[in-house]
């Protein structure tokens, strides 16, 4: 297992077989294949690399490969796609395509797994691109068929997408199932936000520049806000979203990932497990969030980017009297010396006025303000759509007198890359193949994330409505206003 978090030279992944359960699904088409294509373009896949795609549909290797090829080509014409290259390099895609094999299979059939045990030899990754209800049964079947047994120096690893459980008890049960079938070192729990360059860049940003560490604590920071705002609605996923909602979908995973990277203590060592330990300790210090510190919202009809948008309750697959939230805002605290007394505000929602994922650190005023109050004193760290940072400072306006205006110092959180159209799954695949756990969640971190919101899942606060195309419900602004704080406007 690789443990160092830095490389003088990135090594290509070792040979392995990637088995994808859910080969015909949206995740495989939209994210997994583009990531494999990019890894092939970077020369990071071994010639011995193979892909076995398994799904219930009648198909063939040629039909599956043709379908994936057509999807890859369609991305070149879709500027809204997460993966949008100018063209598909035939050599790189050909490398992936010629290694594809399709197999029809019933995930509940023990014969499928016994057959795989006779087919798959050497190193193997098992990717569960399936509904969450199948995670436990699939891991159990892989274990009983001996597919997770590591002998003769080979590795066997399982990649599990979110949501990892739908509450704390189910997450604990899924962790138990996984650890009955394999070791913790074989379970790679995915939060694709860790694959984003801007999120990974928080490590060097915080710990390679002493200037930040000197002010990264309760004595200098007034409050922090973390936002993941979307302009899209639930689209065709209404039936799924009805059972999930914004709280389950985003907070215990993506929002907690950003929070932990922003606030964790310096790792004890320069290795991946030390980073994961620091993140887990931070998440364990978050107390249960009360209903008084939670706002749940649901979008009504409105206009998003100038286009008419229907209400959530009018979406296909959604109940006419649905109480599912499409927006959630939270106030939480961290019980540690560094952060005691600093409020953290988290919000995420759909059909909002702008698409933006960002973290904003608001600094306290100086002990003695010799000059007029500064118009702003905050640090913006943007993850999407344009990764980067802005330190907003006060500066003198040109001319006579001493009048202050807002100034800005800008920097990048994503360096230039010849493979700019990346979706974050390249690092996930490459890390799993090399045994690098840096981008993956540990069992205790997953359970701490669910534990923080469990009380809200059991007894959710009332629902507030907000118009599509707005910044969210008025109650979310009031959540901050009661302590004299405010959200950074989305637009």
Image (cartoon, rainbow, N blue to C red):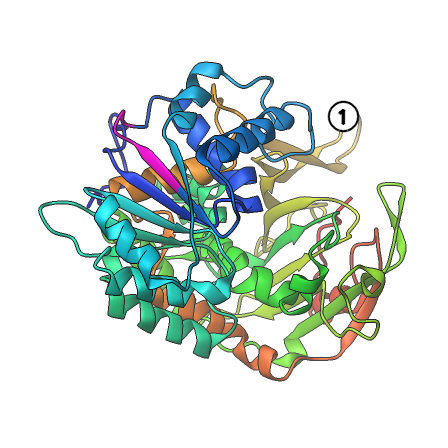
Relative to 269, is 253 on the left or the right? Answer: right
197 or 443: nearer the viewer: 443
Give 214 or 453, whichever is nearer the viewer: 453
Q: Nearer the viewer, residue 249 or 263?
A: 249
User: Residue most toward the bottom?
Assistant: 459
Res 144 quadrant in image? bottom left
Q: Judge left or right: residue 89 versus residue 229.
A: left
**Residue 449 position within the rendered picture, expressed as x and y whole percent measured from the top left:** 46, 67
Image quarter in which the C terminus is found:
top right
195 over 228 or under it: above or below: above
Residue 43 appears at what percent x and percent y?
Answer: 34, 21
x then y, percent, for residue 205: 43, 39
Question: Quadrant of residue 465 in the image?
Answer: bottom right
Q: Position of residue 459 (x, y in %)?
A: 63, 84
Q: Secondary structure at mark 1?
A: loop
Q: Is residue 218 magenta?
A: no
Residue 340 can be seen, yes or no: no
Q: Is residue 436 left or right of residue 161?
A: left
- Above or below, 449 against 271 in this view is below
Which residues are the magenta region? 46-52
Q: Which residue is mark 1?
A: 398
Residue located 52% across and 46% down the image: 58
Residue at left 59%, top 41%? 382
Q: Per the image, is 47 magenta?
A: yes
For the point 28% across and 48% down, the residue is 272
User: Horizontally, is 332 left or right of 209 in the view?
Assistant: right
- Name the foreground residue: 7 vs 104: 104
């Amino acid at each position: 297992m690789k443990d160092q978090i830095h490389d003088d030279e990135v090594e290509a992944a070792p040979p392995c077989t990637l088995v994808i359960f859910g080969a015909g699904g949206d995740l495989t088409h939209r994210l997994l294949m583009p990531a494999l294509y990019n890894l092939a373009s970077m020369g990071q896949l071994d010639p011995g690399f193979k892909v076995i795609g398994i799904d219930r549909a009648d198909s063939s290797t040629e039909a599956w490969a043709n379908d994936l090829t057509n999807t890859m080509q369609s991305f070149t014409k879709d500027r809204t796609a997460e993966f949008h290259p100018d063209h598909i390099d035939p050599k790189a895609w050909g490398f992936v395509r010629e290694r594809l094999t399709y197999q029809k299979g019933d995930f509940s059939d023990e014969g499928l797994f016994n057959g795989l045990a006779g087919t798959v030899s050497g190193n193997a990754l098992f990717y569960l691109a399936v509904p969450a209800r199948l995670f436990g049964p699939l891991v159990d079947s892989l274990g009983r068929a001996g597919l997770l047994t590591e002998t003769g120096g080979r590795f066997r690893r399982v990649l599990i997408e979110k949501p990892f459980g739908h509450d704390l008890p189910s997450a604990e049960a899924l962790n138990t199932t996984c650890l009955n079938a394999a070791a913790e070192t074989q379970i790679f729990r995915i939060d694709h936000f860790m694959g984003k360059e801007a999120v990974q860049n928080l490590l060097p940003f915080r710990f390679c520049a002493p200037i930040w560490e000197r002010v990264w604590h309760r004595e200098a920071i007034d409050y922090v806000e973390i936002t993941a705002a979307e302009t899209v609605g639930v689209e065709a996923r209404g039936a799924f979203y009805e059972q999930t909602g914004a709280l389950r979908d985003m907070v215990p995973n993506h929002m907690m990932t950003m929070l932990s990277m922003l606030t964790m203590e310096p790792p004890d060592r320069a290795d991946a497990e030390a980073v994961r330990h620091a993140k887990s300790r931070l998440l364990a210090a978050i107390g249960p969030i009360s209903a008084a510190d939670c706002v749940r919202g649901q979008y009504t009809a409105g206009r998003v980017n100038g286009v008419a948008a229907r209400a959530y309750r009018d979406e296909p697959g959604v109940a006419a009297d649905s109480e599912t939230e499409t927006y959630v805002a939270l106030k939480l605290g961290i019980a540690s010396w560094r952060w005691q007394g600093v409020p953290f505000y988290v919000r995420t929602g759909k059909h909002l006025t702008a698409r933006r994922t960002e973290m904003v650190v608001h600094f306290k005023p100086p002990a003695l303000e010799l000059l007029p109050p500064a118009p702003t004193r905050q640090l913006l760290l943007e993850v999407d759509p344009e990764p980067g940072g802005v330190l907003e400072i006060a500066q003198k306006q040109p001319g006579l007198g001493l009048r202050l205006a807002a100034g800005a110092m800008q920097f990048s959180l994503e360096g230039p890359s010849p493979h700019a159209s990346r979706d974050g799954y390249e690092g996930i695949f490459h890390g799993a193949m090399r045994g690098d756990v840096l981008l993956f969640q540990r069992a205790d971190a997953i359970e701490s994330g669910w534990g923080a919101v469990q009380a809200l899942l059991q007894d959710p606060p009332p629902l507030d409505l907000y118009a599509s195309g707005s910044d969210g419900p008025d109650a979310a602004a009031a959540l901050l206003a009661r302590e004299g704080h405010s959200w950074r406007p989305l637009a």
